[in-house]
Image: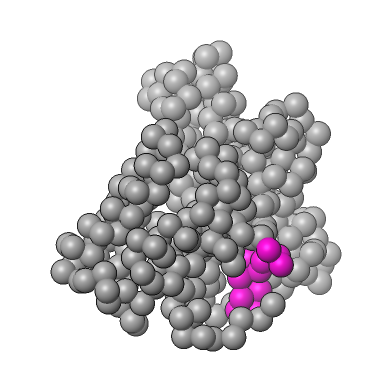
């Protein structure tokens, strides 16, 4: 997790990283989040009493008014009251967002989607997260965050994800899914450069390793990544037909490691599967802010709330 302290102009003052250590349990994870905030304040010589508010991005569906993370599969969280915990600890307003919503809002404020009316983000990683800023507001439901695009069923496939669903964007195009296919290639001797770099250890098949294997000439590795890009392209086309965003942002470690490949392949598929009139109305871009996007987006959102800016519902 990354914690960043911003001033009232949303300029970063100090940042710090710390592992969540979700295997220690919910309470320990929450305490580590709070301690990280405290350490950042100490490092910057800023008293906690001067905090205007805290914005935090968490994975999974979020009950945004109550600050509750309903479920975060990768963390083992269910109905975790993050907002209430941090409000009691620091005595200031807290806004809990879905982490990709926060990242997309950050890109909307100062990154790849700056100047857009509406933007959508798709972030392939361990899973695949999605977020949307529609006409300047984070698109959300009455109670819960939305845009759980990674769990939308797109193809007929036996691959199963962490939720038990099959044929979803996440089961077909996440880094974990791609790595699973690549390990098979390495085992069969069809990806010699990947085998040399990572063996057949799934945990070693990281984004940069995949990118380097492609640069070194592993054609089958490139094929697997291109197939994943095609599935993401289908998802982008569906989004364009639904809400016609002017900007679609691709982010996450996979995209950062192979930006040209992802832009080319996702764009090719997406443009091919929408009406002609839509092809000129949206642009696909790579995220520009990296890990800072979610921190900036969460900070900007809580600043907006504290300033009592009316939020369109």
Question: Does 203 lie within the magenta span?
Answer: no
Is 191 placed above or below 277 here?
A: above
Is 31 placed above or below 276 here?
A: above
User: Toward the viewer: 93 or 286?
Assistant: 93
Residue 294, percent from left and from top:
45, 61
The residue furthest right is 275
Q: Which residues are drawn in magenta?
A: 131-143
Residue 304, percent from left and from top:
49, 80
The answer to whether 261 appears left or right of 242 in the picture is left
Residue lying at 77% horizontally and 43% vertically, measured from the top left: 154
Residue 5 visible to an observer of this rendering: yes
The residue furthest front is 88
Residue lying at 78% horizontally and 38% vertically, measured from the top left: 155
For the image shown, how many numbered marks are present on the structure? 0
Residue 240, percent from left and from top:
74, 64
Residue 216, percent from left and from top:
42, 32
Position of the C terminus, as image quadrant, is bottom right
Residue lying at 67% horizontally and 66% vertically, measured from the top left: 140
User: Toward the viewer: 116 or 277?
Assistant: 116
Using the rendered view, name the quadrant where residue 181 is placed. top right
Is 255 placed above or below 313 here?
A: above
Using the rendered view, name the quadrant where residue 113 is placed. bottom right
User: Toward the viewer: 46 or 88?
Assistant: 88
Residue 126 visible to an observer of this rendering: no
The answer to whether 16 appears left or right of 60 in the picture is left
Q: How is the image coloured?
A: one colour
């Amino acid at each position: 997790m990354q914690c960043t302290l911003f001033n009232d102009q949303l300029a970063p003052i100090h940042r710090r990283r710390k592992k969540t250590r979700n295997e220690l349990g919910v309470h320990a994870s929450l305490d580590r989040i709070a301690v990280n905030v405290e350490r950042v304040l100490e490092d910057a010589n800023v008293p906690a009493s001067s905090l205007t508010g805290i914005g935090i991005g968490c994975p999974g569906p979020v009950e945004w008014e109550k600050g509750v993370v309903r479920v975060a599969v990768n963390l083992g969280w269910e109905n975790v009251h993050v907002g209430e915990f941090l409000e009691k600890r620091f005595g200031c307003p807290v806004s809990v967002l879905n982490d990709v919503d926060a990242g997309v809002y950050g890109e909307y404020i100062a990154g790849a989607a700056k100047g857009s009316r509406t933007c959508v983000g798709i972030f392939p990683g361990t899973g695949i997260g999605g977020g949307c800023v529609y006409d300047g507001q984070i698109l959300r439901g009455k109670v819960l965050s939305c845009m759980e695009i990674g769990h939308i069923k797109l193809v007929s496939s036996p691959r199963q994800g962490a939720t038990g669903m099959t044929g979803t964007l996440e089961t077909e195009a996440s880094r974990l899914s791609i790595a699973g296919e690549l390990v098979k290639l390495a085992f069969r001797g069809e990806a010699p450069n990947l085998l040399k770099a990572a063996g057949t250890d799934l945990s070693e098949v990281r984004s940069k390793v995949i990118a380097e294997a492609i640069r070194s000439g592993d054609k089958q590795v490139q094929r697997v990544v291109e197939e994943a890009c095609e599935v993401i392209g289908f998802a982008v086309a569906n989004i364009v037909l639904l809400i016609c965003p002017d900007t679609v942002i691709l982010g996450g470690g996979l995209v950062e490691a192979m930006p040209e490949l992802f832009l080319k392949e996702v764009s090719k598929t997406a443009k091919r599967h929408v009406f002609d009139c839509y092809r000129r109305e949206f642009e696909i871009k790579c995220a520009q802010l990296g890990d800072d996007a979610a921190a900036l987006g969460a900070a900007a959102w809580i600043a907006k709330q504290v300033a009592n800016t009316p939020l369109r519902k």
